[in-house]
Image: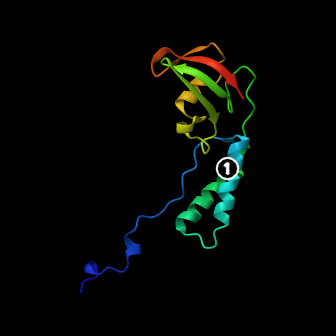
Amino acid sequence: MSVAFRRESDDEHKEPKFDIPIPPGPNLVTERGLGLIEDKVAALEAIDTPDEEQQRELRYWRQRLATAQIGPAPAEDEIGFGSRVSFRLNKAKREIRIVGEDEADPATGLLGVQAPLAQALIGAGVGDLLPFGGKDDAIEILSVGR
């Protein structure tokens, strides 16, 4: 039989697994975010015989832990990393907190610092009207907290 028709094993035909990409830029985290990363590393390290995917995840989370930096506290009256913000976007009231990329969960109001909306908010204060999505005055800042 020709070698072209012989199959050595299924492993030969699998796509290679690459490491999980690390987001560019500094790894800013909140205190909560740092705790979540530490918990993730501990849980993965506790696995007796991790499979390939778990080892891959562990490499990612160890790297994120090693590079984690607690973000600077925002000014009292200015939106920054870690701020809790209440605002109107196109007349709909929303509340978010600006957090690190690994902590982000937009469905629960945790918005990653690199997200376009977070970038639009940073530096603003209560009462400011901001452009967003090609529309002037699309965002009105209602309150800022920590």
- Residue lying farthest to the bottom in this orientation: 1
Is 38 displayed left or right of 56 in the figure? right
Asked if 134 appears above or below 42 in the picture, the reply is above
What residue appears at the point 65 percent right and 56 percent down from the top-left corner? 40
> In the depicted view, which residue is nearer to us: 24 or 130?
130
The spot of residue 23 in percent (x, y) is: 57, 45
The spot of residue 8 in percent (x, y) is: 36, 80
What residue appears at the point 24 percent right and 83 percent down from the top-left corner? 2
What residue appears at the point 62 percent right and 60 percent down from the top-left corner? 59
Q: What element carries label 1?
A: helix
The spot of residue 6 in percent (x, y) is: 29, 81
- Point out the image quarter for the C terminus: top right
Crowd rating for badge 1 (residues with CA inside 10 Å; few <14, some 14–19, many 20+): some
What residue appears at the point 48 percent right and 62 percent down from the top-left corner? 17
Residue 62 visible: no
- Point out the image quarter for the N terminus: bottom left
Report the label total: 1
The residue wearing badge 1 is 36
Residue type at mark 1 is Leu
Asked if 37 appears above or below 70 in the picture, the reply is below
